[in-house]
Structures are given as C-alpha cells and as structure tokens.
Amino acid sequence: MIRLENITKTYELAKQEVTVLNDVSLNIFEGDFVGIMGRSGSGKSTLVNLIGFLDKKFKGTYYFEDKLVEQYTDDDLSKIRNENVGFVFQNFGLIENMTVGQNVELPLLYAGISNQEKTRLVAESLEKVGLADFVGQSVKLLSGGQRQRVAIARAIVNSPKFIIADEPTGALDSKTSVDIMQLFTDLNTTSGVTIILVTHDPNLMAHCNREIRVSDGEVVL
C-alpha cells in the first residue's frame, strides 16, 4: 500500500542544511500493524508526516497504492489525506467547545454525504470504541482515556486505509494505555485497519506485527 524509495528530507537551519531523513526505503502493506520505533529526534515524526501526506517536500519517491505521490497537487493530497488517513495524537487534538459527536463528525464535513448518513457513521464509530452513549457529551467532561477513544472514533469514522497513531498513549496512565492499545489491536484484526504506531516505548511493540526502527534519520534493520 505504501512504498518509500530513497527518501531524503532536509531543512535549512542557520544557513546550514540539516538532514532529518537520510535515504529511507520501506514498505507498509495493507492490514499491517507497524511500529515505528525511535528516540526523540530520531526522525520518526518527520517520517510519518510524510507518509500521512502532510509534507511533500522531500527527495526520493513515495508510492501510495502504486501511484506516485509527487504527481498530485496540494488539493489532491488534501482529498487523499481526508479519505484515506486517520490521525491519532498524544494530546488527543479534540475541540473543547464541541460535543463528542461533533468532534467525531469533523472528517465527514467535506465528504458530501447527508446528515442522516453522518449521524449513522458517527454512531457506528463511537460504538466501536465503547462510547455509544457519549455522542452528546461535552468533551470537557471526559477522562484522558475517553478523550483518546473519541480521537480514535474520529480517525476511523470515514473508514480510512490506514491510521497514524503518534505516541497515542503518551498522556495516559499504564492501565488506560493497555486498553487503548487493545482497541487498536481489535481495529486491526477485526476491521482490517492498517495501523502505523509511532512510539519511543518498546513495551508497545508487543502489539505490532512488524517493527521499523529509526535512528538518526535512517531506518535500521
């Protein structure tokens, strides 16, 4: 599904060129649960931003479903990202003054579907994460674990091809972290969602079927 060949990413810092990713090549297949492991500053977040179509300024080639990403316009990539990628972040990324249902609905706003269909999809997503009765609840009243479940419901509401989970348990206690990782595992095994987990925590690798280790901007086999 995802194929990167000889990807190099550089920034200019204080008039010097800094290499963040150096000649990275990797494949991610449909149905994978991949763990991208690396210390802070290793380049793993830069790598997943690129995979998630948030950054197209790089050298090398990126194929998504055998199509060359660099041939797409920015508008094309926005559409592809909205239809194919779900994002889950450490800080949840929810809008505080909205309800749970309104947050989950956000990826559907530009999908051109009816309000009735939106309501159905939001309800299905919340049921999958164990929050079926929370649709009208204020986000401000939720625990950290509940907030992350809402974020996951939002990530899966448009049936994405893959989910990028960037340190999804970083702000959670150990028991809640186990529950959230089990939820990702269930989505992967039951619903066939491809999961790309980004973490520096080796304990989370037990949930993955494959590990990609990043160190100093390079993939280490």
Image (cartoon, rainbow, N blue to C red):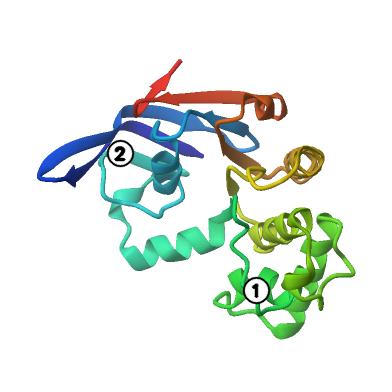
Q: Which mark is residue 96?
A: 1
Give the image location of residue 118, x and y in percent. Answer: 72, 76
What percent of the width, then of the height, locates residue 121? 75, 69
Q: Position of residue 57 (x, y in %)?
A: 26, 49
Give above or below for 86 relative to 119.
above
Which residue is the extreme one toward the top? 221
Mark 1 or mark 2, which is nearer to you? 1
User: Disc 1 marks which amino acid?
Assistant: Glu
- Number of numbered discs on residues: 2
| Image: 102 above or below 66 | below
Answer with left or right where residue 94 lies relative to residue 184: left
- Judge from the rendering whether residue 152 lies leftward or rightward of residue 24; answer left or right: right
Point out residue 128 in the picture as x, y percentages from the top left corner: 82, 56
Helix, strand or loop at label 2? It is strand
Report the amino acid beneath label 2. Thr
**Crowding at mark 2 (Cα within 10 Å: few <14, some 14-19, many 20+):** some
Q: Secondary structure at mark 1?
A: loop
Q: In terms of depth relative to the viewer, which is nearer, 12 or 140?
A: 140
Marks 1/2 in contact by CB < 8 Å: the verdict is: no
Residue 8 located left or right of residue 201: left
Residue occupying image coordinates x 53% and y 28%: 37
Residue located at (78% from left, 65% from top): 142
Which image quadrant for residue 34?
Answer: top right
Residue at 72% over, 29% down? 207
Residue 57, labelled with which disc? none
| Residue at the left extreme of this rendering | 15
In-front residue for pair 106/75: 106
Dot 1 or dot 2: first in sequence order is: 2
| Picture quadrant of residue 103 | bottom right
Point out which mark residue 61 bears.
2
The residue positioned 67% from the left and 59% from the top of the image is 151
Up-down: is 74 above or below 138?
above
